[in-house]
Amino acid sequence: MKFDTLQQGISFYENYARVSGFDTRLYSTKKRKSDGKISLKYCVCNKEGFRETQDFNQTAKRKDQ
């Protein structure tokens, strides 16, 4: 889909997410090199890229340099 403004696109996705039962977050942005304007903005489910939490009770190992 293409929107006239960035805010219209973000609002559309946030409304869709609310109706569908999930939360959103802004993920990343790409800008044009020629003028620095935003050309692409990723809005994703807030679980996108979710990783399981690490067990911090284990002893951390470090590389000696």
Image (spheres, grey):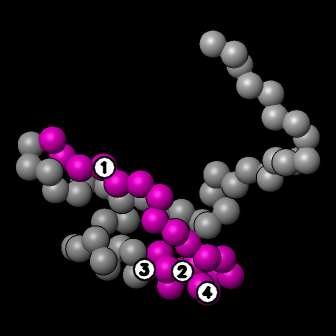
Residue at coordinates 74% horizontally, 50% vertically from top-left? 51
Q: Position of residue 49 (x, y in %)?
A: 64, 51
Three-letter code for the amino acid on which mark 2 is drawn: Tyr
Q: Are marks 2 and 1 in contact (CB under 8 Å)?
A: no
Residue at coordinates 74% horizontally, 25% vertically from top-left? 62
| Residue picked out by circle 3 | 12
Q: Which marked residue is nearer to the observer: mark 2 or mark 1?
A: 1
Most extreme residue toward the front, as rendered?
A: 64
Three-letter code for the amino acid on which mark 1 is drawn: Lys
| Residue picked out by circle 2 | 16
Q: Is residue 43 left or right of residue 65?
A: left
* Badge 2 element: helix
Depicted 13 relative to depicted 62: above or below:
below
State the separation of the CA atoms marked 1 and 4: 28 Å
Q: Are marks 2 and 3 in contact (CB under 8 Å)?
A: yes
Q: Quadrant of residue 44?
A: bottom right
**Mark earlier in primary sequence (4, 3):** 3
* Badge 1 element: strand
Most extreme residue toward the left, as rendered?
A: 35
| Residue picked out by circle 1 | 30
Q: Is residue 61 magenta?
A: no
Q: Which residues are magenta?
A: 12-33
